[in-house]
Image: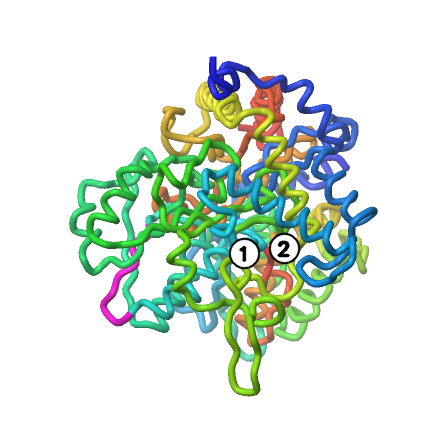
Amino acid sequence: MALDDIYKEVILDHYKNPRNKREMPDAELSCSRNNPLCGDEITVFVHAEDGKVHEVSFMGQGCSISQSSASMMTEAVAGKAVEDVHALIGDFRSMMAGDLDPSEEELGDLVALKGVVKYPIRIKCAVLAWDVLQEALGGTGGEASGGSPH
Amino acid sequence: MSLTEERSARALDVARIRADFPVLQRTVGDRPLVYLDSAATSQKPRQVIDAESDFYAHHNANAHRGLYMLAEEATEMYEGARGKLARFIGAPDPATIVFTRGTTESTNLVAYAWARRELKEGDEILLTDMEHHSNIVPWQIAARDTGAVLRYIPLSDDGLLELSDLGSLLTERTRLLAVTGMSNSLGTLPPMGQLIDAAHAVGALVLVDGAQLVPHVPVDVTELDCDFLTISGHKMLGPTASGGLYGKLDLLERMDVFLAGGHMIDEVFHERATWNVVPYKFEAGTMNIAQEIGLGAAVDYLEALGMDAVRAHEEEITAYAISRLLEAGARVFGPHDTSVRGGAVSFWYRDVHPHDLATILNEEGIAIRAGHHCNQLVMRRYGVPATARASFYVYNTNEEVDVLVEALAKAEDVFGL
């Protein structure tokens, strides 16, 4: 293991300069959750209309992995059809479970988080924002952030 | 010179102690393990591991059941551990020690068998804002079921109990004061004598959460005069799932039973049963026999070191750690004066989230805790989502503190601070 695997430049960039980190008071959908392991909390706001996710923003505090994952997520899903967003959530989960080894072409900046797979305890941090997004969209959030021992 | 004085004069031989702990010989990657998470669970010396394994290899039988030699040996060893634990905390009688899985189960036992039976609407339970969740949630449930009310002693900015309003919090309505003997996140040692006297003056009982206290500070329950003390075995060099509850004998005798089953009964009829004597009326089913025997060995180990020497060693290393962390620019929570605190040192380093810090320090072989430490009230009080925590025990050295502080620079490199 090397720290470069987890703390890649793109992750640190999103952590220090988070994209779309703001409240969206007129968002149609929003949802909050926390990670009981580390105290991280994230609220995701979704502006969705006619089967399309137009804009996503987030608020909250947490470690570099949870915050950068949330930031990258807001960029990755904006403008996508809801069903494509669900597919992306599925792909992201598969990557974090180590079941999928996507290329940068497929997942863009998000592949930077692949290194987190080597740090099993931190996977929950990476998946937290995605759980919240899925719940906001009306799917059931994954189990990754629920009921973790602490 | 009395035996006690000789003990207190003797400093710990940490190199020799470290040689007793097999896990401290291992590496993490290519780095020696620097274990700074004893407040979560302590490491185990060979003497404890051997005691547990020797029981299984040579004496294993159920305690208080059989009439053959093995069963007698098992019973004698199990009860021997109870006697050791009683003596260790200054309890007058081994019967005042109920074996449990640890402090959580002990607190739940009192909440269930005492609070639910004794409390009524309008009664109050007084807690503090520095309690571990395991000394809050059982009382919330007891309060919900009885109509009792919870009140909390607040914290000062420097991590001490704010006692100026104690008179308005501790009244004739207070039936129980449940307070930690040492905070697991702030390290604070509340003034137990003062609190216990004040509680008794209004007729309230006192439960001391001894999870962090008993492993690190000499404790004498007779002198303290607390009504209950919860004890965690795995935080004092013993096996996981070992531990106990001390209670004053007359209280334990008056209390309702907790878990029901074998051995806690005297006689069983179709419609009812009568209870075994204290402490057995609280020990239903087959207990953690090997683990409590291991705890007995842990008590032997700590007594051989001398608890005064243990406390002195931790005061020294804690003072060193706090001064080095402050020098490095960390915010250190809780009191900085080591005469009123123990060795659980929570800190926040620059802008590095504790979770990131723990991952980075792990690369250097350092094990610290990062999170809310089951202390969400404390985190809220000081406006942080989490802290990093280094905690020390008999096997830790100032050199390990140096490794920790030097590794903080690595976090700065990674985050470009």
Residue for point 40% across, 67% down? B141
Q: Position of residue B380 (x, y in %)?
A: 37, 48
Farthest top residue in view? B1
Question: In the structure shown, which secondary structural element does the residue marked by tag 1 occupy?
Answer: strand
Q: Nearer the viewer, residue B362 or A70?
A: B362
Asked if the stretch drawn in magenta spans residue A104, the answer is no
Q: Are marks 1 and 2 in contact (CB under 8 Å)?
A: yes
Would residue B149 be found to the left or right of residue A46 on screen? left
Magenta-drawn segment: B120-127
Question: In the structure shown, which secondary structural element does the residue marked by tag 2 occupy?
Answer: helix
- Res A70 seen here: no
Residue for point 40% across, 45% down? B180
The three-letter code of the residue at mark 1 reads Asn
Are discs 1 and 2 both within one chain?
Answer: yes
Q: Nearer the viewer, residue A105 or B233?
A: B233
From the viewer's perspective, is residue B204 above or below residue B354? below
The quadrant where residue B112 appears:
bottom left
Q: Chain of mark 2?
A: A
Would residue B295 be found to the left or right of residue B339 on screen? right
The quadrant where residue B92 appears:
top left
Q: Nearer the viewer, residue B14 or A104?
A: B14
From the viewer's perspective, is residue B101 above or below residue A88? above
Dot label at residue A124? 2
Asked if the stretch drawn in magenta spans residue B124, the answer is yes
Q: Position of residue B355 (x, y in %)?
A: 57, 42
The quadrant where residue A15 appears:
top right
Q: Position of residue A79 (x, y in %)?
A: 59, 66
Would residue B376 be found to the left or right of residue B124 on screen? right
The three-letter code of the residue at mark 2 reads Lys
Q: Label 1, on which residue?
A: A35
Q: Which quadrant is the N terminus of chain A positioned in?
A: top right
